[in-house]
Image (cartoon, rainbow, N blue to C red):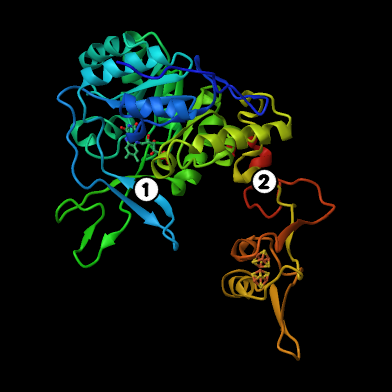
């Protein structure tokens, strides 16, 4: 196969070293394409590398015969101006033969040795199936594997994907087989369709995983055609639930990443962060919450491979400004500040402040606070009919609602108050009815 080969690496951007060593997998930068259509063939992956992506996770391989997809496949949750807030798909794993995929992976890895190439795999939860496919994948020379235990549609019905990812015992078992029959790093990709993400992460660790990646997609129905009475995407006159991803899932994904990063058993387990990452800032947030690399799918599907340029440029500029020399310098830096509610400072107080020079008198803050918060904004109308909105400081509880509602950037700011009171957690708060119990027996909390 003829294909363009690696040129200069994309390690140094704006003088900053963006390279990562993720669980033993080296890449010139932390921006990887997630296992999905952008990585389903050599043609795509090579152009992604040319555009500057540091790595890819190849579209999930399975046993032959290859999966068969339906038409149509995608739908979206749109914002008011048709921006895609969330994306939904009912696709399966690769619909190309194992042999073609393995051949292409081998050729791409050979031509692009400096880029990370990870192979995603989903086969039945039987030792023989893993024992068969793993040596074939190892022979490609790829840098590692990612176990797709999280596909929410099509595959669980066949005992694969989320059917395994929702069962910690099976996760542990499959991970152990992979460590037994494959010599390079094993990443376990987690499904978010579970109550407590720490359970599958701990199971992956017990099985010997080198890292986890998350999140895969969230079960979803994005919208309905109310004339035809069917959800989208529509296949003939029917539909089914799909997997939700894109910007809308980022908050859910970040919480799950943080949960694993601050959980004692898994705190040192490398995490590849996935879910709604669209720009450098999203990526930096995932890294600050403990991700050592990030993966992108929807943003690349909507805007193309070149978004990585902004990601690398923006991240490296920000790192230079903050004095971070490497990605590792700020990996997990926000974790010590991410805690349980009971440890928050009950004596901290912040109050809304309205900048009258920026205010356009729309009244949205007033309505929000008056109708649904603490009636802490006064509306004053002068003789000429001009409106003025003022915060009643004694009433404001500092909930942020007015600031969130205000359409003008920085018009409402939240101002921390000097209370003179020391830090006091809920465990120490005299208003806590269980305080006595906690003082007598701190372990009971
Ligand atoms: C069309 C489509 C196909 C996908 N196929 C796979 C797949 O084969 N294997 C897999 O592990 N994840 C698959 N995913 C999930 C993505 O890898 C990723 O986990 C998810 O989309 C969240 O990232 P995002 O918000 O950047 O899209 C797919 C996602 C989409 C949108
Ligand atoms: S912060 Fe909350 S309580 Fe205070 S003025 Fe704004 S909406 Fe009202
Ligand atoms: S929402 Fe903002 S712009 Fe509108 S009245 Fe309130 S402070 Fe002024």
Q: Exactly how many numbered labels are in the figure? A: 2
Q: Residues within 10 Å of mark 1 (few under 14, many from 20)?
A: many
For the point 40% across and 50% down, which residue is it? 86
Mark 1 and mark 2: Cα distance apart in space? 35 Å
Sequence order check, earlier mark of 1 and 2 = 1
The location of residue 329, given as percent across then percent down, is 66, 25
Determine whether 409 is above or below 192 in the image. Answer: below
Determine whether 259 is above or below 128 in the image. Answer: below
Q: Is mark 1 within 8 Å of ligand 1?
A: yes
Is 439 placed left or right of 214 in the picture?
A: right
Which label sits in the foreground, 1 or 2? 1
Q: Nearer the viewer, residue 23 or 34?
A: 34
Is 199 placed left or right of 378 in the picture?
A: left
- Element marked by disc 2: loop
Q: Tell me the quadrant of ligand 1.
A: top left
The location of residue 347, given as percent across then percent down, is 75, 52
Determine whether 63 is above or below 131 in the image. Answer: below
The location of residue 202, given as percent across then percent down, is 44, 25
Quadrant location of residue 404?
Answer: bottom right
Which label was assigned to residue 344? 2
Is 292 placed left or right of 298 in the picture?
A: right
- Element marked by disc 1: strand
Q: Is mark 2 within 8 Å of ligand 2?
A: no
For the point 45% across and 24% down, which residue is it? 55
Residue 148 seen by the camera:
no
Quadrant location of residue 287?
Answer: top right
Which label was assigned to residue 87? 1
Q: Nearer the viewer, residue 201 or 388?
A: 388
Is 186 placed left or right of 343 in the picture?
A: left
């Amino acid at each position: 196969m003829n294909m363009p080969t690696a040129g200069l690496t994309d390690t140094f951007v704006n003088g900053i070293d963006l390279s990562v060593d993720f669980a033993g997998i080296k890449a010139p930068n932390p921006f990887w394409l997630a296992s999905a259509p952008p990585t389903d063939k050599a043609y795509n992956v090579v152009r992604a590398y040319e555009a500057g992506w540091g790595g890819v996770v190849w579209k999930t391989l399975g046993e032959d015969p290859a999966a068969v997809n339906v038409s149509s496949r995608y739908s979206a949750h749109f914002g008011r101006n048709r921006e895609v807030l969330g994306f939904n798909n009912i696709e399966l794993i690769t619909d190309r033969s194992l042999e073609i995929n393995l051949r292409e992976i081998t050729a791409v890895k050979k031509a692009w040795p400096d880029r990370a190439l990870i192979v995603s795999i989903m086969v039945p939860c039987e030792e023989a199936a893993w024992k068969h496919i793993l040596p074939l994948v190892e022979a490609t020379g790829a840098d590692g594997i990612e176990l797709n235990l999280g596909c929410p549609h099509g595959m669980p019905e066949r005992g694969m994907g989320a059917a395994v990812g929702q069962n910690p015992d099976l996760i542990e078992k499959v991970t152990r087989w992979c460590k037994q029959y494959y010599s390079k790093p094993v990443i376990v990709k987690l499904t978010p369709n579970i109550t407590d993400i720490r359970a599958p992460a701990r199971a992956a660790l017990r099985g010997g995983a080198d890292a986890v990646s998350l999140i895969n997609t969230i079960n979803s129905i994005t919208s309905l055609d109310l004339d035809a009475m069917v959800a989208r995407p529509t296949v003939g006159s029917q539909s089914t639930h799909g997997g939700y991803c894109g910007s809308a899932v980022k908050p859910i994904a970040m919480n799950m990443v943080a949960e694993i990063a601050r959980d004692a058993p898994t705190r040192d387990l490398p995490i590849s962060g996935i879910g709604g990452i669209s720009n450098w800032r999203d990526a930096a947030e995932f890294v600050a919450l403990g991700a050592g690399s990030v993966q992108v799918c929807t943003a690349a599907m909507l805007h193309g491979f070149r978004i990585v340029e902004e990601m690398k440029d923006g991240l490296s500029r920000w790192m230079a400004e903050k004095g971070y020399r490497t990605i590792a310098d700020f990996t997990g830096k926000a974790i010590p500040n991410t805690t349980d509610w009971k440890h928050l400072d009950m004596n901290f107080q912040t109050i809304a402040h309205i900048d009258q020079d920026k205010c356009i008198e729309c009244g949205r803050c007033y309505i929000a606070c008056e109708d649904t918060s603490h009636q802490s904004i006064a509306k004053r109308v002068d003789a000429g009919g001009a409106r003025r909105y003022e915060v009643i400081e004694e009433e404001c509880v500092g909930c942020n609602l007015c600031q969130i509602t205000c359409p003008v950037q920085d018009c409402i700011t939240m101002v921390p108050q000097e209370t003179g009171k020391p830090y006091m957690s809920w465990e120490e708060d005299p208003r806590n009815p269980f305080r006595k119990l906690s003082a007598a027996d701190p372990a009971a909390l």
